[in-house]
C-alpha cells in the first residue's frame, strides 16, 4: 500500500476507464485475506488469531498459553494468542476474523485505503472488491486447536443461555471428566444437553461470529460504497475440510 502500489493501481484504473473495462480490486497482497499485508496483526494482540487447546496437566504448552476453567481428569483447556513470527505471514501471524474490531481494522487498512484514493470511481469503473481464501482458523497453531476469539464466551452464552467454560473439555474428548448432569438437561444420546449438542453450539457460535463480524461487516461496507464483494473461503472442497480449517459456507453466505 505504498506509493508504488498507488501509482500502479491508478494506472490500471485510468486504463480501464479509457477502454470501458470494469475493474475489481483485491483486498490483500497474498492469501489468505485478512491481514492487510501484516498491518492488522501488528495493531496488537487483540487482532491476532486465537485458539483453544487441551493438554495433560504437566505437559509442555506454548508460550503465552493461559488456563481456562478448571482441569478435569488430568486435562486442562488453554487459550492462546498467536505470537508474531509465522513465516507464512511475513514473520507476523494471521488475524482474528471472528472479532469485529479486528475486521474493522482490516477494512480501514485495505478497503478504506482504496476508497480514500479511488472512491470517485467506485460504482463506475471500479465495481467490486475480491477477498480470497478467508478463514477463521489458520497458521502455526498448537496441535488439536479449535477456533477462539476475544468475545466468543460471552457470545456463546448470549446465543445459547449457559456458560460454556465448564464444558470446554468436550471439544477435545468424548465424555472424559464429565460428571452426570453437568450440562443443562444432559442426556447421553445426542439430544438437548449432550456433549454432541455442546459441540454444535460451540461451532455454530464460531460460524455465526465469522458470518456477522467478517462477511456481513465487509459486505455492508461495500454496499455503502456502491461496489460488490466477491471471493471465496478457505478449503471449500468438502464439508470435512470446511470444519477442519475454515468457516462453514452456508452460514457465512446466508
Image (tube, rainbow, N blue to C red):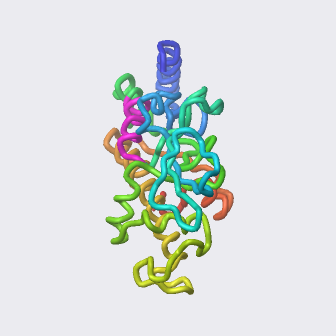
> Which residue is nearer to you in this view: 5 or 192?
192
Outermost residue, front direction? Answer: 58
> Which residue is nearer to you in this view: 65 or 150?
65
Is residue 165 visible to us here?
Answer: yes
Q: Which residues are magenta?
A: 99-112
Residue 21, compared with residue 211, is above or below; it is above
Residue 235 is one of the magenta-drawn residues: no
Residue 55, compared with residue 223, is above or below; it is below
Q: Position of residue 151 (x, y in %)?
A: 37, 52
Residue 104 is one of the magenta-drawn residues: yes
Marks counted in the figure total: 0
Q: Position of residue 20 (x, y in %)?
A: 50, 30
Left or right: 162 as drawn, with respect to 84 = left
The residue at 35%/47% (across/down) is 220
Main structural element of the magenta stretch: helix, strand or loop? helix
Is residue 121 visible to us here?
Answer: no
Amino acid at each position: 500500500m505504498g506509493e508504488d502500489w498507488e501509482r500502479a493501481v491508478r494506472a490500471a484504473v485510468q486504463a480501464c476507464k479509457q477502454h470501458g473495462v470494469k475493474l475489481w480490486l483485491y483486498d490483500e497482497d497474498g492469501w489468505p485475506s485478512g491481514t492487510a499485508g501484516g498491518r492488522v496483526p501488528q495493531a496488537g494482540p487483540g487482532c491476532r488469531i486465537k485458539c483453544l487447546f487441551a493438554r495433560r496437566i504437566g505437559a509442555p504448552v506454548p508460550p503465552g498459553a493461559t488456563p481456562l476453567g478448571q482441569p478435569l481428569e488430568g486435562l486442562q483447556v488453554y487459550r492462546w494468542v498467536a505470537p508474531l513470527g509465522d513465516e507464512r505471514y511475513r514473520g507476523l501471524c494471521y488475524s482474528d476474523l471472528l472479532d469485529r474490531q479486528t475486521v474493522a481494522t482490516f477494512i480501514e487498512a485495505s478497503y478504506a485505503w482504496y476508497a480514500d484514493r479511488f472512491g470517485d470511481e467506485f460504482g463506475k469503473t471500479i465495481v467490486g472488491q475480491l477477498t480470497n481464501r478467508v478463514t477463521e482458523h489458520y497458521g502455526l497453531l498448537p496441535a488439536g486447536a479449535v477456533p477462539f476469539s476475544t468475545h466468543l464466551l460471552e457470545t456463546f452464552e448470549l446465543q445459547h443461555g449457559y456458560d460454556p467454560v465448564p464444558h470446554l473439555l468436550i471439544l477435545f474428548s468424548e465424555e472424559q471428566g464429565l460428571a452426570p448432569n453437568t450440562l443443562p438437561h444432559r442426556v447421553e444420546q445426542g439430544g438437548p444437553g449432550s456433549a454432541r449438542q455442546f459441540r454444535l453450539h460451540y461451532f455454530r457460535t464460531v460460524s455465526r461470529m465469522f458470518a456477522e463480524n467478517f462477511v456481513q461487516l465487509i459486505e455492508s461496507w461495500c454496499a455503502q460504497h456502491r461496489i460488490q464483494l466477491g471471493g471465496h473461503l478457505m478449503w471449500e472442497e468438502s464439508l470435512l475440510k470446511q470444519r477442519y480449517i475454515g468457516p462453514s459456507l452456508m452460514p457465512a453466505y446466508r
